[in-house]
Image (tube, grey):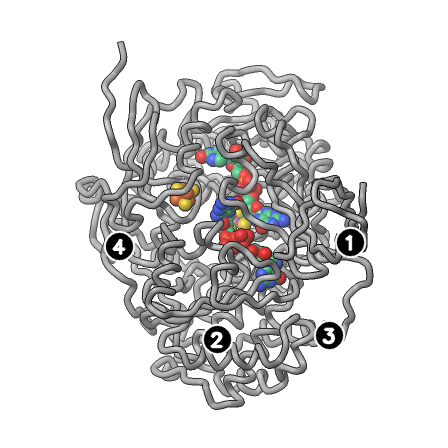
Amino acid sequence: MSQPRVERAATCMLCEAACGLSVDLEGGRAVSVRGDRDDPFSRGHVCPKAAAIDDVASDPDRVRTPLRRVPGTEDRWEPVTWSEALEEAGTRLAAVQARHGRGALGLYLGNPTVHSYTAMLGASLLSRAIGSRARFSATSVDQLPQMLASLEMLGHSLLLPIPDVDRTSFLLVIGANPRASNGSLMTAPGIGARLDALAARGGKLVVVDPRRTETAARADLHLAVRPGGDAHLLLGVLHVIFAEGLAAPGRLAGFTDGLDRLAAIAARFTPERVAARAGIDAQAIRTLARDFARAPRAVCYARVGACTQEHGGLVAWLVLALNVVTGNLDRPGGAMFTTPAADLVGLLAKSGDRGGFARYRSRVRGLPEFGGELPSAALAEELDTPGKGQVRALVTFAGNPVLSTPNGGRLDRALAGLDFMVSIDLYRNETTRHANLILPTTFGFEREHFDLAFNALAVRDVAKLAPALVPPPPGVRHDFDVLVGLAQALRRHGGGRPGAATTLTLAGARALGPRRALDAMLRLGPRRTSLAALARAPHGVDYGPLEARLPGRLFTEDRRIRLVPALFEGDLARLEATLEGPRAQESLELIGRRLLRSNNSWMHNALRLVKGRAACTLLVHPDDAAQRGLATGDVALVRSRVGEVRVAVELSDDVARGVVCLPHGYGHDRPAVALSVARAHAGASLNDLSDELRVDALSGNAAFSGTPVFVAKA
Ligand SMILES: Nc1nc2c(c(=O)[nH]1)N[C@H]1C(S)=C(S)[C@@H](COP(=O)(O)OP(=O)(O)OC[C@H]3O[C@@H](n4cnc5c(=O)[nH]c(N)nc54)[C@H](O)[C@@H]3O)O[C@H]1N2
Ligand SMILES: Nc1nc2c(c(=O)[nH]1)N[C@H]1C(S)=C(S)[C@@H](COP(=O)(O)OP(=O)(O)OC[C@H]3O[C@@H](n4cnc5c(=O)[nH]c(N)nc54)[C@H](O)[C@@H]3O)O[C@H]1N2
Ligand code: SF4
Ligand SMILES: [Mo]
């Protein structure tokens, strides 16, 4: 007998926009998903991916019971019970630590971790229980430089300024494509409509990007920067602002140190000096500087393209500095700070944790630690380089580093050589196929949802609690239970960090559960709310536009902004060395792209998102194509220092001459990958070309942008 259809409010957990959803439930499934018009923040906006949440949940390829790889085989898997799986995991991982030291067990946390508050809490417990420095995450292939700038300048790595898009009159976007990504470190559901509104009120949008993206194509101005040339551009902009007396920090001057010092630095970088490396002519740099400085309310906003490059740290610093110098930090229409209902930043700071940098370094290459993690660009070498401290066992949670970290090919091979590996994931994919055990978790509407991370990064102060709506498949467990259960199993067998505290904390945390922790955070938070209160507002609560928070919200010792941290100033010599260097002959510079119907590496098994025209194509400028005898539809051989791929070519003058562009997250046609739909739309992996040795030498973040490649007809 069919059950009646009911409609419920939910939140999309796929990307940072956190759109409100209206979900029709029938027979324990989400049979229809629409935008929730009653959500005060997203007002009905959704993108095509939301409908695929149920595709993942009901995917026949989804792992629904713990799986053990049959010893000695690479592609035979057998179901095991949870107690067998956790026992085996605990025994084997503890044995590796007993034999080779605690640091021999590594942990990699993937992007979806931050889309589940229960996973965030559970992962931090597991990480502490493991007690190893070999921790890695998607942070160091993403926003690390921006967190570093916040740590150095504002005193807390998680105090990230958010562009006040709804009230600005000049939005300068560097290395972001919100019309495809739906916004990042800027939770702004319906960003397309918000950008349209900016234009409608007479505001300006300028996009700095080597490709004429969906966002750039509809901007007032597109500046086709050369990959990795943004710090040069920004120094030129600051030069003009100081030289022409346009600096106007306003009230910020009362609590900012280093304005004169920054002026002196900027004086060295005339637009003429930086133009060639930036790929933008001096006059355009001057105009940009004047327009930005003179706009009544302006904000410079940078994201992935600005971070994942050789000068990511400098760019992040200069972006924040530009907002300060023009008085746009912490004022409406500028870059502002949230007052989130669950204030993780404030709570961490109270416990003495503001983040940290370079407190120790990685074993093989000496790359700096950040926030208790090592750069993911060092993951493969930490696994495959013999010696004391070599990582011999790994736990991955919600990550696919074979497709998402630089030189994924090397990591792919390194994973095959591990003594033991446990993956907590929904799928048997390019990474988890190497695991000895795959532990499956709940997903999507099977979990209660509260955006611990993204409510704190939103363009308005909002909060929303969405209950679990559908029952999980019987064989899976909640992410929190799996993470903490694994930690307990490890401790039971004598692994991990010794001391009763850990064991007791784990037992206590398991007994209390993540809801109690969240409720306490909400009650202690600035909104003095609670789970119960939020449950009474199923479409979410909108506390209003962002409010000025400085200097009170600063976490530096003296509550002052440090405009010129020595760390960044010291890195300028490296940038100056690039000013004269000619571009390598013959090689092209590879950049990535995101597609609206894709989400990093893991949604290509949803037919509704991958059907139609092949998405994983190499964009080549017609002039570069002509030189190589390439036409649209040809297969190109693309080779870098680390690997080569074959991929279909698409001619496009959206990319600047000398630049080629391939999306990341593809390359699904490997043995033992159980993704039947994705395999038929496999594409090639951008990260089989990206180079793990190319990092931002300052921060250790991966430098994907501008990887030199040779392209020829296959
Ligand atoms: N549809 C979809 N949405 C997503 C994701 C997805 O995979 N698909 N992923 C989510 C995640 S994890 C994140 S972090 C966000 C990212 O959100 P965004 O940062 O907005 O995403 P991208 O589209 O990667 O934008 C980066 C831009 O930088 C440009 N770029 C590359 N190199 C350079 C450079 O050297 N300088 C400059 N100025 N620009 C450069 C690229 O051409 C690209 O347009 O998106 C999230 N949303
Ligand atoms: N060249 C290049 N590389 C990039 C980027 C780029 O722009 N260019 N972008 C980088 C960025 S910004 C990011 S964030 C990283 C992402 O890198 P990763 O986080 O390593 O990779 P994802 O593709 O997000 O993989 C997510 C994994 O989590 C699983 N998963 C999804 N939901 C759940 C869940 O609820 N529970 C559990 N247990 N598992 C789940 C999926 O099956 C998948 O295996 O990629 C980075 N890599
Ligand atoms: S924009 Fe992001 S949050 Fe909104 S529906 Fe699409 S994937 Fe979900
Ligand atoms: Mo990301």
Are there few (<14), some (14-19), or many (20+) residues within 10 Å of tag 1? few
Q: Nearer the viewer, mark 1 or mark 2?
A: 1
Task: Name the residue that disc number 2 marks.
Answer: 322
At horizontal 54% and vertical 84% (from top left) the residue drawn is 240
* Mark closest to the chain's N terminus, 3 or 1: 3
Tell me, yes or no, if residue 367 can be seen here.
yes
Are there few (<14), some (14-19), or many (20+) residues within 10 Å of tag 3? few
Task: Name the residue that disc number 3 marks.
Answer: 577
Q: From the top left corner, tell me how far across and down residue 40 is, in percent.
A: 24, 49
Mark 1 vs 2: CB contact within 8 A: no
Task: Name the residue that disc number 1 marks.
Answer: 626
503 to 159, vertically: above or below: above
State the CA–CA distance, disc 3 to disc 4. 47 Å
At horizontal 67% and vertical 34% (from top left) the residue drawn is 99
Mark 3 CB lies closer than 8 A to ligand 1: no
Q: Nearer the viewer, mark 1 or mark 4?
A: 1
* Mark closest to the chain's N terminus, 1 or 2: 2
State the CA–CA distance, disc 1 to disc 4. 60 Å
392 to 631, vertically: above or below: above
Are there few (<14), some (14-19), or many (20+) residues within 10 Å of tag 2? many
